[in-house]
Amino acid sequence: RGIPVYYPLLHIGKSSSLHALCEEAKSAETESQRYERALASHRSQISSYRKRWEYSSDSAATTSTKTPSRSWPDDVPSNEDLSWLLEDIKYCVRSPNFRSDKDYCPRLSFRVASALLVQFDEESQKQGFEMLRSLAEKGYSDAMVYYGMCLNNGVANNSPDSDAAVSWFKRCADIYEHPQGQYELGVAFYTGEGVLEDEEEAVRLFKLASEQNHPAACYMLGDCLLDGIGVEIDRVLALEWLVRAAELGHRGARSRVMAVLEKKEGEDYDGFTDASRQTFTEHTVLSANKEGRIMRRRSTLQMEIGGGSRNPTELTRRQTIVSKSRKES
């Protein structure tokens, strides 16, 4: 499947407000027609999806594809492996692997740090945190992102520091175009944590990460397109990106796509998603974004005061969506 086309928003001046409203009415009908065609196309592939995803109508999860409990990092050593990895790291520069691959030692150190950070004792966590910090300061991209995540979450008995976390995410995304860095920075702009909330910037970053096949970013981009967060509502593209996330192994996206495609009136899909997300029914209002462009938006709380600290209800909703994107990929 190719990369979905991303349609830029058109600038609409104040003098053409009436014209814009008329155009919006037309585009709403056109969007509905496009969406029905897209549904028909995807419904013709339900059998293929079910086979690849091992979908079961009474299960909200898949069984065959590796789906870790957190999206990244996904190569954390087991406790059994940690003991010998700690020994290997002492002599990694003497290893033949290091002579042929200069990233061998940083990669090994990153894996060890990742394993230490999930231990239950505080001493191990602090050791992993310091290893991660050292790697990040040396410019190892994975460590830069993960160190930011640890700062944001306040691991190893440290106080959460979302401002410092965002600086690491931005540095890594700018220097390395790291997909996890782009995703984490997008989440920050989406929730307004550590940075001023900017929905359009969040969508831009989710799209960059999605184009590098980041499952959680694909899920978030699909959700933003569905809800009109930072972008005009487009249910066709929303479905395309959710399918992309599903193909990449995202359990929540798989359940959500199948719930949409197999939705029957009067049936409740419980853990899959709420009814509005099953049907992708469009309940929108018209509003202008910060540049004066008219956008069709869902009539949720963020229409009035955003999703940041000024609106705890909407912030909680967004944090829940982000949590789903992380845990089910």
Image: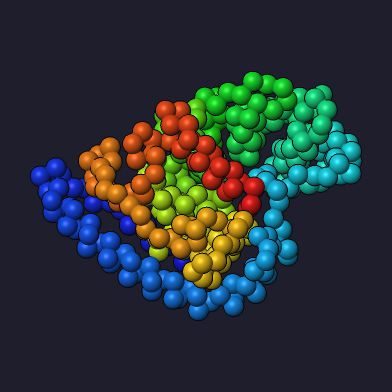
Q: Choose between 242 and 310: the one closer to the eye.
A: 310
Q: Quadrant of residue 72?
A: top right
Taking 49 as reference, is 313 above or below it? Answer: above
Q: Quadrant of residue 82?
A: top right
At 82% across and 31% down in the image, what residue appears? 120
In the rendering, at what x and y percent does residue 85 appear?
85, 40
Q: Quadrant of residue 289?
A: top left
Q: How many marks?
A: 0
At 50% across and 79% down in the image, what residue appears? 44
In the rendering, at what x and y percent does residue 146 appear?
64, 36
The reply to whether residue 179 is in sight is: no
Taking 257 as reference, is 184 above or below it? Answer: above
At 27% across and 65% down in the image, what residue appears? 29
Q: Choose between 119 and 93: the one closer to the eye.
A: 119
Q: Choose between 144 and 312: the one closer to the eye.
A: 312
At 58% across and 23% down in the image, what residue appears? 161
Taking 16 as reference, is 237 above or below it? Answer: below
The reply to whether residue 125 is in sight is: yes
